[in-house]
Amino acid sequence: VKNFRDCSSKKSIGFDLQGSFAEELVVDSRMVIKIPKELTMSQGALLEHLCCGYRLADDLVNSEIDLNSCIAIFGDGPIALANVRFLVLRGFTNVSVYGKYPFRLQSASALGAREVVNINSLDSFDVKELHEIDVCIVSSSADSLIKQLDSKFHPGTIIFEQTKISDVDLRSHLVANGSIFFRAFAYQISDFTEVINLIKTG
């Protein structure tokens, strides 16, 4: 259980395995997080997403990535927004979010993203206007977006995959052009305690 982040055959209930809608479920007690009474049910429902963002920001800090690096988050879902929240809290100043839902992009701006890009509008303006990408965080399926923004990746661009790049040829192309893949996977169990404490203290 200690190294579950590195398990190559990890399976998740409700994703790889059926059972998330069962009335009762048996799981290893070491994998259960008790939600304290101080948290609302809504906060509890977002806890896992927040832990993903917390872990990602911690991984970037531990990788000694410069706080002024141009960080592009591909996706605007709950995990992408959690990424923004924790990256900004950890001092990263140049975070951009690429997404397709205006209300989520507004949330990204409110959380501290310096730039938001509606990918539905990419065809209507010059991609050259966008910043070069130092760090790319793939928070949702983004193969076509990566291809569209290929010119913004440079030798040394670091890619964190929260969602895998599924196109093998695209991955090979990025590596051949000098992009570097760092690991990014979910969270550690201890992250739940840290995030719960952050929520409790506001």
Image (spheres, grey):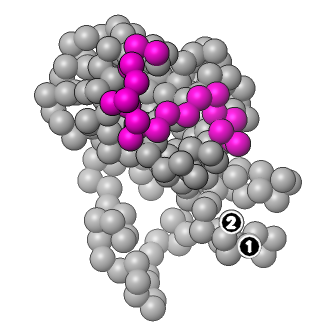
Q: Position of residue 184 (x, y in %)?
A: 44, 37
In the image, residue 6 lies in the stretch drawn in magenta: no
Q: Residue at x 49, y 46 (%)?
A: 76
The answer to whether mark 2 and mark 1 are in CB contact below 8 A is yes
Specify whether 27 is left or right of 194.
left
Q: Residue 108: which quarter of the image? A: top right
Q: Position of residue 178 (x, y in %)?
A: 30, 10
The CA distance from mark 2 to mark 1 is: 5 Å
The amino acid marked with disc number 2 is Gln
Residue corresponding to mark 1: 40
Specify whether 8 is left or right of 198.
left
Magenta stretch?
Answer: 109-129
Residue corresponding to mark 2: 43
Secondary structure under badge 2?
helix
In the image, residue 122 lies in the stretch drawn in magenta: yes
Q: Residue at x 71, y 50 (%)?
A: 194
Q: Is residue 16 above or below residue 183?
A: below
Q: Position of residue 91 (x, y in %)?
A: 72, 26
Q: Residue 88: which quarter of the image? A: top right
Q: Residue furthest front?
A: 124
